[in-house]
Amino acid sequence: MTWKMCMERYAGDDRVSSLILVKYKGGSAANVILYEKEGGCWKPILSGKGCVGKNGIGKQKEGDGKTPSGIYTVLQAFGICPDPGAKISYLQVSEDHYWCSDAEYYNQLIDINQCPHQCRGEHLIDYQGLYDYGLFLDYNRECELGRGSAIFMHCLGEKNYTAGCIAVPRSLMKEIIKKIEKNTKICIEET
């Protein structure tokens, strides 16, 4: 689906009032633009440079270093830092939160107090800086083992690429969280 088609698809959908476009530029570079709907038309309100997987976009499997292309829904905002004023649900992560990669809970947020086991996934609080602020996306909601997990939008780190997520500067990520509303879509495609 092209950018224009993505924007047209949601222009008439009253449930979607925010749209994040991740325009892949080659390598691991991307431009990220947040649009808000005003009178059925999309208006850009925030933008900046970002990065995607070290091997570009078009994810096929876990560990391929690619960001999945396509359209996804933002599920929830999260972060190690306190809620910056999100309009959507915000989870301040603690020592108890993991994004699980084990077969039984593959690609799911786990609170080990509610679901006790020795999780081998990402211990979210260990990602200081990167996960100061972020968004959980609905990539692989079927939890198909090996298809890829823990695909988020989060703060940019020291590298100019990710393992498969989308990363933007911390200040931009924080502002995106403060602006987006329920049912925000994120469209990841080549330009």
Image (cartoon, rainbow, N blue to C red):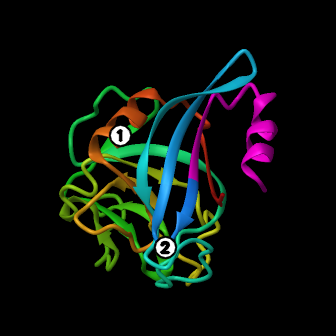
Query: How far from the left and from the top, in percent, is residue 41?
Result: 72, 23
The tag earlier along the polypeptide, 1 or 2, is 2
Residue at coordinates 81% horizontally, 28% vertically from top-left? 12
Q: Which dot, 1 or 2, sits closer to the camera? A: 2
Q: Which residue occupies the foreground of this view, 80 or 190?
A: 190
* 102 falls in the magenta region: no
Q: Tag 2's secondary structure?
A: loop
- Tell me the quarter of the picture where residue 84 sits: top left
Q: Which mark is residue 172?
A: 1
Query: How far from the left and from the top, in percent, is residue 113?
Result: 27, 59
- Tell me the quarter of the picture where residue 43 sits: top right
The Cα–Cα distance between marks 1 and 2, rounded to whole angstroms, is 21 Å
Residue at coordinates 45% horizontally, 69% vertically from top-left? 28
Q: Which mark is residue 27?
A: 2
Is residue 143 left or right of 89 when viewed as pictured? Answer: right
Magenta range: 1-22
Is residue 82 left or right of 117 when viewed as pictured? Answer: left
* 20 falls in the magenta region: yes
Is residue 122 left or right of 67 when viewed as pictured? Answer: left
Q: Quadrant of the N terminus?
A: bottom right
Query: How far from the left and from the top, in percent, is residue 173?
Result: 36, 42
Q: Which amino acid, mark 2?
A: Gly
